[in-house]
Amino acid sequence: MPIQTVKMVVTGPFNAGKTEFIRSISEIDVVTTDEGISPTSAEFGTKETTTVAMDFGRITVDDDLVLYLFGTPGQRRFDFMWEILAEGMLGFVVMVDSSKPETFREAKSILETFRAYAPTPYVVAANKQDHPEAWAAEDLRIALRIDDDIKLLPCVATDKESVKNVLLELLYSILEEMEET
Amino acid sequence: MALKGNLADFSTTQILNLINLARKTGTLRVYEPVVTNETITDGAGNKRPKIVPGTERASASFREGKLILATMGIQDGHLANVLQKAGKLNTEQARIIRERGAKYSDKALALMLINANYVNQTDIVRSIQQHTVDIVYDMMAWAKEPFIFQENELPPADRITVPIDLKNVIIEGTRRIKEIKPLEDELPNLDMALKFPDSPSEKFRGIHLSVEEWRVVSFINPKNSIRQIAKSCNMTDTEIRRVVYGLLQAGLVELLKPPHLQPQPVGAPGAYAGPPRPQVTVKRSVVERLIARIKET
């Protein structure tokens, strides 16, 4: 029996927690295409590596069904990968670092870009809710101008249960969309 | 809980919009920017110097989404000064009141001034109101200051507070914005359309719009792009951006996709079917199996 693969994309600004999100739920070690950040680079001091092409995680449902999670590179200089990764996705998650308002504008821009790629369901994950300076999810909804009918979910990407909740809510949204069409 | 950030990333106008829509109570403090040797990285991976709060420059307090008081760090917010600035007291009167009334709270002092027929209650309310909004208009022009909004922090009980609807403050403050870049950042695509939010009549109640702003409002329709509205109103890109930005931040209108990208009703006579949507190749049962699998993970 041929294996059916289903693809979901995890996107968001630089250092929003996309790789951690996939790492928390993937059954395999996440295949990352990271490069080290040089001391002269803009990101040095923020984290040691950054995703340059994609992250890749997997959840096997059965012999004939596999879910693939693709994490996009957060930096604009790798945005040529976004459209490639978005092709054929069932839905997507937009990760936002709730504690860094300097990334909100980019998060909104990425969200609009992915909406333009494909009219698939999506959810917004307000990540790093365990950070003392995190903005509340409902404040983020107003700050990012997210419509009330889009799910905006508090998230801690290092917490598996939190990641499960985000993915489940995305799948419920996909089911709802199927019922409407 | 506190909201921290920098006005370079989240402008005063956006903060006011958030406070208005979420009906927040608390105090916003804006600080002198102190540039450090450290760097931070924005969402696109660009590096910039880290700016930390210096001395307090101004503060504004809010109760349930309404502006109630503002103070400028370098100004003395004494009631006598506020009344003098509003032309209700002359310099000598203000000086005497400052000297003799130093031990009284604003509320007690206001009562004494009213009883002495220096001013009436309306004078006091309007003077404080004007003083408050003038400070907030100044704050709306700042672009790189660190800020902290501390929820549920209110001015001392002996201060006189006057509730002011934020929608009009946002509209008027936007009219005064001279910088074009923030407007372009917030409204890059003039091919977007506009629509009214739910219950628009309620939202527009008590709003003071200029003739030009009302003209723009009269053209708001999901079928009209912002660019088309600008053309009909004979406005430049900057002029239309300023008006639409103000209306958006005040929550009076909402952005829509460009008219040609909006979904059309299926089967409507003469309706354009729109670009072909990718076929859903996944069955409902597949999604249900995914849900079951993730639940057991």
Image: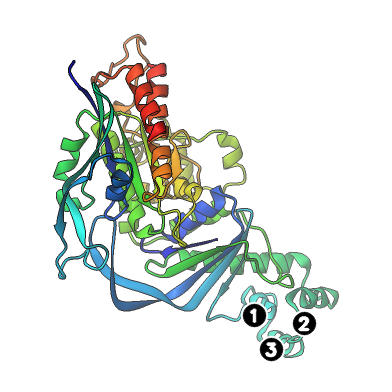
- Mark with earlier residue (1, 2): 1
Q: Are marks 3 and 2 in contact (CB under 8 Å)?
A: no
Disc 2 on helix, strand or loop?
A: loop
The answer to whether mark 1 and mark 2 are in CB contact below 8 A is no
Q: At 42% from the left edge and 47% from the top edge, which residue is drawn?
A: A155
Q: Quadrant of the C terminus of chain B?
A: top left
A146 in relation to B25, above or below = above
**Residue B104 circle label:** 2
Residue B63 appears left or right of B268: right
Name which residue type carries label 2.
Answer: Tyr
Q: Earlier in the sequence, mark 3 or mark 2?
A: 3
Q: Is residue B207 left or right of residue B8?
A: right
What crowding class fits label 2: few (fewer than 14 Cα within 10 Å), some (14-19), or many (20 or more)? few
Picture quadrant where residue B263 is located: top left
- Whether residue A125 sits left or right of residue A67 in the image: it is right
Return the residue found at the far right. B115
Q: Are marks 3 and 2 on the same chain?
A: yes
Residue visible at 61% across and 42% down?
A: B205
Which dot, 3 or 2, sits closer to the camera? 2
| Vertical comparison of A53 with B55: above or below | above
Same chain letter for marks 3 and 1: yes
> Can you give x and y, in whole percent of width and height, for residue A57 in the image?
24, 40
Circle 2 marks a residue in which chain?
A: B
Q: Are marks 3 and 1 in contact (CB under 8 Å)?
A: no
Q: Quadrant of residue B32?
A: bottom left
According to the picture, the residue beneath numbered tag 1 turns out to be: B81
Badge 3: few (under 14), some or many (20 or more) residues near its Cα, within 10 Å? some
Q: Is residue B286 above or below residue B56?
A: above
Q: Amino acid at mark 1?
A: Asn
